[in-house]
Amino acid sequence: MFLENVISHPQFLSGEAITRFIDTTPELFKFTHRRDRASRLLRFIGNVVVNGNPEMKGRSKPALPLAEPIVPKIILDTKIPSGTRDILLERGAQGFADWMKAQPQVLLTDTTMRDAHQSLFATRMRTHDMVKIAPHYAQMLPNLLSMECWGGATFDVAMRFLKEDPFARLRELRAAVPNIPFQMLLRASNAVGYTNYPDNVVRYFVQQAAQNGVDIFRVFDSLNWVENMRVAMDAVVEAGGVCEGTICYTGDLFDPTRSKYNLAYYVKMAKELEKAGAHVLGIKDMAGICRPRAASALVKALKEEVGLPIHFHTHDTSGISAASVLAAIEAGVDAVDGALDAMSGLTSQPNLGAIVAALEGTERAPNVDLNHMKSLSTYWEGVRRFYSPFEADMRAGTSDVYQHEMPGGQYTNLREQAIATGLEARWPEVSRAYADVNRAFGDIVKVTPTSKVVGDMALWLVLNDLTMHDVETAERDFDFPESVISLFKGELGLPPDGFPLALQNKILKGAAPLTERPGASLPPADLEAVRAEAEKATGRKISDADLASYLMYPKVFRDFAEHQSHYGDVSKLPTPVFFYGLAEHEEATVDLEPGKSLIMTLQGQTEVPSDGEIKIFFELNGQPRTVRIAKAA
Ligand code: 3PY
Ligand code: ZN
């Protein structure tokens, strides 16, 4: 290849002096980079062929080969139509919120690329499957209010399990969809992590998210404590984003025995959020327990009491959440979330296509093309098959959710954790313990990260054959899970009415809890010192976005960077190749960038490891290539 580059170069052909020519013509060496990228990806695939993708450990492969998802047949090189994001760019965040409020039709958010896969298959959807369909969204659904495609658990999972750069995902999607607003889920002071970060880290993260493509930030606090949301909300406003200050819905509006979460509670919080600078008010029903009557009453009350447009989010765990969405729409909600048909239902969002069909002919009918939604859903149907090993074995809605109140995104995760700890057969006990723990913790909001703490405690109880009553009444000390101690110390913030004191004393064993928001006492991070530390640890240049990732998850980022230097950018691999490798004589096309593709075919492998290494024979763009892979013990 090098020789080919030399002899075909115009300067060589012109007969100029060769040595100087090689020294001064760096483009001759470009092929090494491409060759290196290909070698690393072949090494990754070879490893999956020999040792399996570590992500698949303990999971069964689906029947292979899997069919290519069907991409809608539309011509993509036509001009991108103007869409909702053009309104945002023209009018700014406040103008956009005013526009939302003035619309007679209900506005729609598609959660397929974030919450839907977080809730259905453990957040495993890969960038490759999103980017492939993204330009079709731009052509086919330009009037969506937003695509929720970033934040929540996707950030962590992208790096930790999928070995992808979450910021690169955001940039690639942004480039493909310039006309629809992108929405992210931001856990206020917990950003996209599980613990409060210093204020300057939260600010820096929001700034990077906005610069790389996020338009609308749904900001919530896992204890509904507005005081702990201010830093994040201010940062969103400062970055020019739309700030969706969000109430997490919990409890039951109509249960007289549980009056803590009544209308007055929600109206008070909504007013606080409005005062704190929210452009939009979010209602986040993360467990899917806001029943139709409650959705109606809540939206009516909030519409009367606050001036912000309202955006309703729920999960379909019970099986009837679309009724709640329709009730909210009837009561005047401005926007609702749903997932495209193939990615909806169960612990995910209700079915967006069905909601659109139900509203046809009414004055609130959304301005979207149902046929376009159907063809996009056909694509997702194919994509979902790739991830079947990550799906929970859940076949129907469950009204049990009104008892345990687990968030949709947690339900399947906790079930997996229960299986991993040998508690599969005791799942009903875990789910009952979850409800008991919540009661003993003072009936708190359960959403990441507080939901994880309640889940940790529930598993701990069942594993130790204890009940909350045992814990509350026993004289002896217990070794509580770390996350529980941290919650009661106030490290995730404080519930507005505090924690039950007796239990808090027992858990903290006399240590004093925080009395103000954690960010107030966390020292600011020295960002440039952290950048230097990250550069030293990874041996690579750390961009601003990398720094934001490192600040969130230093260890996960280091492992990801190491994986990337060894195996290259694996986000470019088709999903079946990433998880399941290649079968003999199977071919895969890897698009590295526009106009640069690799065609890889697995030709065979040596049977018995001779020197402990198996040789894998590939054909790469027609040329033979061999990789040696050590068989894992
Ligand atoms: C998250 O924080 O990831 C959630 O989805 C909470 O519902
Ligand atoms: Zn959700």
Image (cartoon, helix red, strand yellow):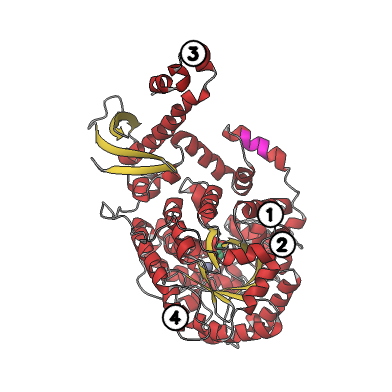
The amino acid sitting under disc 4 is: Ile
Nearest to N terminus: mark 2 or mark 1:
1
Callout 4 touching callout 2 (CB < 8 Å): no
The amino acid sitting under disc 1 is: Val
Secondary structure under tag 1 reads: helix
Q: What stretch is highlighted in magenta?
A: 531-535
The CA span between labels 2 and 1 is: 13 Å
Query: Residue at (71%, 38%) from the top-left corner?
Result: 529
The location of residue 345, given as percent across then percent down, is 41, 72
Q: State whether residue 468 appears in this view.
A: yes
The location of residue 577, given as percent across then percent down, is 34, 46
Q: State whether residue 513 appears in this view.
A: no
The amino acid sitting under disc 2 is: Val
Dot in front, 4 or 2: 2
Q: Residue 202 carries which label?
A: 1
The amino acid sitting under disc 3 is: Glu
Nearest to N terminus: mark 3 or mark 2:
3
Q: Residue 16 carries which label?
A: 3
Callout 4 touching callout 1 (CB < 8 Å): no
Left/right placement of residue 416 relative to residue 457 reads: left
Q: Main secondary structure of the magenta part?
A: helix
Q: Residues within 10 Å of mark 1 (few under 14, many from 20)?
A: many
Identify the residue position indicated by label 4 in the image: 320
Secondary structure under tag 3 reads: loop
Most foreground residue, 363 or 390: 363
The CA span between labels 4 and 3 is: 77 Å
Callout 1 touching callout 3 (CB < 8 Å): no
Identify the residue position indicated by label 2 in the image: 237
